[in-house]
Amino acid sequence: MSTIPELDIDPFAEDVLADPQDFFTRLRETGPVVKLQQSEGHDIVGVGRDAVMRAIFENSADFLNSRGGGILDLARDEPFRTPGVLQETDPPYHDRVRKVMTDVISPRHLRVLRQEFQKQADELVDKLLDLQEFDAHTDLAEAYPLRVIPDAIMGARPYGRENLLRYSVWLFESMGPKTPRAKQVLESVENIQGALAWVTESTKRENVSPGSFGAMLWEAVDQGLLTADEAGLMTRSLVGAGVDTTIYALGMAVNLLVDNPDQYAKLHADPSLGKFAFEEGLRWGSPVRQIWRTPSRDLEIEGVPVREEQKIMLVMGAANHDPERWGPTAADFDITRDASGHLSLGRGIHACVGAPIARLEADALLSTLARRVKSIERVGPSTPYVNNSLRGWTSIPVRITAA
Ligand code: HEM
């Protein structure tokens, strides 16, 4: 048995969060599993190779979710909130609630949403064509999910939706270490307690609209499939996992299209490539930086020992550029590549259950943009999103030309 290789990089240092590519490469090259430095003293190991990560995602017996979806180990640490009933549980409990969620996010229900998503995409692109010059983060990547997702998940309570963004910042920062930077961000989020209360209130039975995913989860209580606590927490999962992930995924794809005009030209020539552009954007720049697992016991990963108390950080952005899996062009953004099989949406029993919703949004928005916009060019540098769990851009200044 060999010893665990070490890498003198703190993945939560501000400069690494702002530009992680060098960390990704060194993580992959250092070993199948690597001990990482962590300024707040967390004992963490990282995985950056595609094949190793894939095997961990597919082995829910040895690699647990129930010990926490973030850096904390719930066997030892106090959770920062009531743990999620879907992402922070293991089989057999997980299988039961997952089945309810999969039935709710059904192809039949997605067909109903498609029309509304397309209408909202048309209206948003009309507005962008009027503006011509805008911020593709705020006015496009953020604006679109905020128009469609709260309605799909909860329906009612049209007021107070700015709380969704505050809630997401709190959630995704809290899943990582409390570095001085993260603490400062958490302290500066305006009225965070109000945002948390708003989310709890919005997921209650009396506040979700008929036809929304939330309402369907509450109906499962009447059918004896969920408890009332589970229905509320599962609606909360959709709110937490479904908003900022999609915002930064859309922004990532648009930013890549701006930086690669040849790829935008291909998309404009064939707008049906919208869904492939989104998938390749997900592969190229995984908007979720990492997913956490905890070993169920002391074990070995490819002959390297990992102790039960070490949290395993699955760094999908690194695996998605692994030349062993993606070949010598792994670092290129190519919308005609077959990007299926990337790990940005996870894999195995916890793979993203909301992926069809994100894909529906992206397909409607990117194909509409492609049809109606001839070219899209940068008018200023993009600003990276520095956050413990999510990656993308908080500003993408662009100008568009109508088709
Ligand atoms: C492009 C946008 C998205 C990305 C990159 C993303 C990423 C992920 C990843 C990596 C996982 C795996 C977690 C694990 O293995 O522990 C996951 C799970 C999950 N996602 Fe997403 N997600 C996205 C959009 C959504 C949307 C739109 C929703 C719902 C509205 C959603 C709801 C969930 C839920 C509930 C889980 C937990 C599933 C389980 O543990 O069984 N996600 N997501």
Image (cartoon, rainbow, N blue to C red):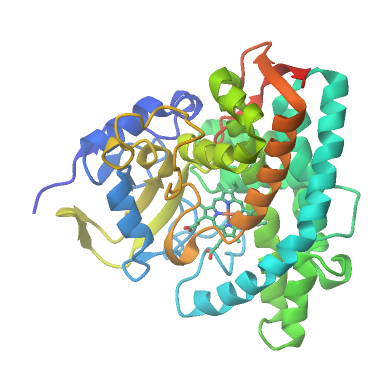
242 on left or right of 345: right
Q: Residue at x 87, y 66 (%)?
A: 209
Residue 107 position within the rendered picture, expressed as x and y whole percent measured from the top left: 67, 66
Q: Would you say residue 9 is visible in this rendering?
A: no
59 on left or right of 178: left
Q: Quadrant of residue 145?
A: top right
Q: Residue at x 32, y 38 (%)?
A: 322
340 on left or right of 148: left
Q: Would you say residue 169 is visible in this rendering?
A: yes
Looking at the figure, which quarter contains the N terminus?
bottom left
Q: Is 293 above or below relative to 191?
A: below
Q: Residue furthest front?
A: 269
Most foreground residue, 176 or 157: 157
Q: Residue at x 50, y 25 (%)?
A: 18
Q: Is 267 above or below relative to 229?
A: above
Most foreground residue, 11 or 128: 128
Looking at the figure, which quarter contains the C terminus?
top right
Q: Residue at x 83, y 43 (%)?
A: 120
Residue 251 position within the rendered picture, expressed as x and y whole percent measured from the top left: 64, 32
Q: Quadrant of residue 296?
A: bottom left
Residue 335 position within the rendered picture, expressed as x and y whole percent measured from the top left: 51, 34
Quadrant holding ligand 1?
A: bottom right
396 on left or right of 126: left
